[in-house]
Amino acid sequence: MTPMLWGAGVLVGLLALLAVGTPIAFALGLVSILALILADGWGSVSILGETFFGGLASFGLVSIPMFILMGAAVASSPAGKDLYEALDRWLNRVPGGLVLSNLGACSIFAALSGSSPATCAAIGKMGIPEMTKRGYPNEIAAGSIAAGGTLGILIPPSVTMIVYGIATETSIGRLFLAGLLPGVMLTALFMAWTIYDCRRRGVGLDMLGRRFSFRERLEVLPRVLPFLGIIAAILYVLYGGVATPSEAAGVGALFCLIFVAVIYRLWKLSLYSSLFRDTLKESVMIMMIIGASELFSFALSSLFITQTIAEWISLLDVNKWVLMAIINAFLLFAGFFLPPVAVILMTAPILLPIIIQAGFDPYWFAVVLTINMEIGLITPPVGLNLYVINGIAPNITLGEILRGSIPYVGCMVVGIVLLCLMPEIALWLPNLLMGPAL
Amino acid sequence: KASHQWPGGKGDVRDEMVQILAREVAKADVGVEIKVYPGQSLFKANEQWGAMTKGQLDISAFPLDYASGRHPQFSATLMPGLVRNHDRATRLNTSPFMDDIKKIVNDAGVVVIADAWLAGGFASKKQCITSPETMQGQVTRAAGPAFEQMLVGAGASISSMPSSEIYTGLQTGVLDAANTSSGSFVSYRLYEQTTCLTAPGANALWFMYEPILMSKRSWDKLSKEQQDALMAAGKVAQDYFAGEAKGLDDKMIKTFKDAGVEVVEMSAEDYDAWLAIAKETSYKNFSENVPGGEDLIAKALAVD
Amino acid sequence: MSFYITAVSAVSRFFGLIAMVLTGSAALVVTHMVIVRYFLGGSTVWQTEYVIYALVAATFLGSPYVLLNKGHVNVDLLQLRAAPAGRRILQTLSALAGISFCALLAWSGWVYFHEAWSFGWRTSTVWAIPLWIPLLPLPVGVGLMVLQYIAEIIKIQGGAR
Ligand code: NA
Ligand code: NA
């Protein structure tokens, strides 16, 4: 059988397994091992354990559960509510002020969490009920949180950037820096759309919200300071020569646990068991997908599918922007069905050499890839953020969440276009602080 | 199937060695075709050994020390100061020391096709590393536990990270110094982040055995003619490597000098001082914990 | 039947708890490592390895608990649209796929563990702990996945009656 035929077989098998609802990790794993058994015989099973274990036993991956734990610790405190309430006092006279506060809170929380669903949950738990209470349509309330939550993987720290860094042997610290300004840019685009949309619909000039005096606005600032303090501390640990990203993640996690206990005086055991449960659910899910992706890329490479596809793409003699458009379309498509970590692990090793050969920067590409993945998080059938919002706001239908997030998908596409026109948005900061890349 | 961990098609000497093997075998026209999977595109570096012993991987260019968890004797192939320089490495290949090592390799179900010893050095952004005293207080990334033990013995502190993170580690200040192979020093552009390089020269502490290996199960499936062709191809690859190994060091020295980095070498006294520390740390550990360890070290040091 | 479900679920919860403790301990140990190296200038021998293996163990041991809580993300578009009978079939098929993979992985992991145990393999680091210790959570956790999946199938079939 030719590699392309094997590739088609693996794809069909994978889609069939996914369609019946097999968890993504096990679908990836099963289709890989079946292909290997068919090609090389039962002996292939003997390497399954070592490959899966080896895929997980890496110090770089330590940062994933740790950054998730860090976000979960802050999310379990009233921190999210404090954050957007503080912002609300400053923004409530702007059309859509409360939505803007929530988007802002999402972007600040994203700097404390490596994952998007966690960002969604942390801000949405308080933010969505408050928005609907003050008369915002369900669509805007849910859509803005779904979109704001996606910033979790763009604004550092980011689980997907970590995975990309490990898969492509690029610097994780540098990837984090590359995501920062694009994250701010997306936040601004989201906010600009919100102001326009609210004005257009004539909602959101908060008649229910009262006018705050300047003094009241100043009063609330100290409540935001602890977050900014933690963010500054983590940046210092990361870029001040104290520790590697994995170590910074562990220190940050412990720091946030202590912070929640001390600042908010939360000592209930149930709180800690629920935050560790949330951490475990998300990190185990991601880590199992990572282990299975390891098998999947092993199978693709062993059957020479990866190499054949890469060769095929490099023979496609097209303009580099056409190539980029094709790759974007492909990533978007994959993102509809698969969570970010799986897409990155499966495609980055194939795409990166092609990207570099075409003259694109690998750090810039990481940002474009991440925004593509963000879109995938708020589109069906697998949109983790949609599930989260469905969970925290059961009275809002999936359709309403979807309709609400579509305009923000538009904002992200605009973001990608801006990044293509001005790669400096991603590259300026890392180049400034870390010098030119390798 | 041949697998290794270095970038493919970019002139890496170890990749080239495997490619030569594949080309030579193809040229011999004995019905053997070798497909090369570079850059860990098939197996992760550490998993190659297990895959070969199980017959799931045929050939690998493999740093033997990676399997030292299974065969602790292999630590001797990344033991500080046992090799000293390239000429001695060549003599070592045919010594009783290597006979012992290869016997363990064979008993584990793996065949050596071609020998290769790679040199390496130290680089620091704080202070040139020559005598053990210069190591004091430097946070260092070391390749392998035997080196870690010796460096700690000299007063360094160790930070573990994959070689791909060394650059960032030096840049952000997590690391003051690093210890790795000549090839990695160049490919990871560590000259941009360091001020002083300790090149291998006549008294190098860092040598690593990275032979081309073959699974015994795959080997036994070949005919005599095919085996001979493979061994002949291995010889060509080995000779190519021997010619290039010193070239790797020269290239490193030139790149670092061009980047304005100071380049030093260890003197014979420095080397002896390090050996004294190694005897108290890594050698001692090795002799105490590894069956036949003391004997192996004695045999290696006996080579002149 | 319901006894089986209760028992397996209890075991999964127990290992889930262990996984949470391991995760918490990793944060403590990483911080300890950074303090020792950066603030005290000392060397760290065992911390890196402990953290890696603790989190790998947390992944395998916590996986059955995550399955119990439907935390392994999947594409449930078809399942949601299907009629109850069709949904049960789809759910059973997906569970069978999950079981097949977990059984193969657990078996292979068991063989790997057993080799490490009987040949006395160690990790190739300064700490050099016996390799079977970090390998044990793989067959245990993924083996328990098989048992937990059987419980899930019983639940699915129970829904038919
Ligand atoms: Na983030
Ligand atoms: Na999606």
Image (cartoon, coloured by chain):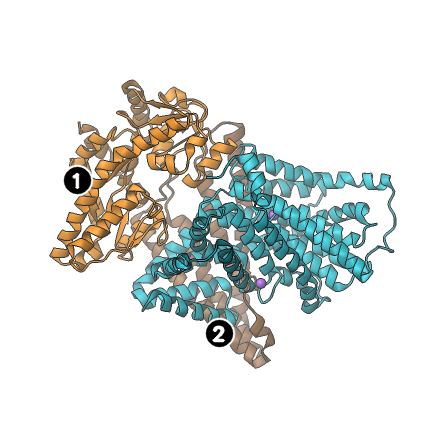
Chain colours: A cyan, B orange, C brown
Percent position of residue A48, x then y: 37, 59
Residue ID for mark 2 = C93
Nearer to us in this view, B216 or B281 = B216
Q: Amino acid at mark 1?
A: Asp
Nearer to us in this view, C86 or A341 = A341
Percent position of residue A225, x then y: 72, 38
Q: Is residue A310 left or right of residue A436?
A: left
Q: Amino acid at mark 2?
A: Leu
Q: Quadrant of the C terminus of chain C?
A: bottom right
Mark 2 lies on a secondary structure that is helix
Percent position of residue A132, x then y: 78, 61
Query: What residue appears at the point 73 percent right and 63 percent down from the top-left corner?
Result: A139
Q: Chain of mark 1?
A: B
Hey, which quadrant is residue A397 in on the image?
A: bottom right
The correct choice, above or below, for A66 with respect to A337 in the image is: above
The correct choice, above or below, for B182 with respect to A294 in the image is: above
Residue ID for mark 1 = B99
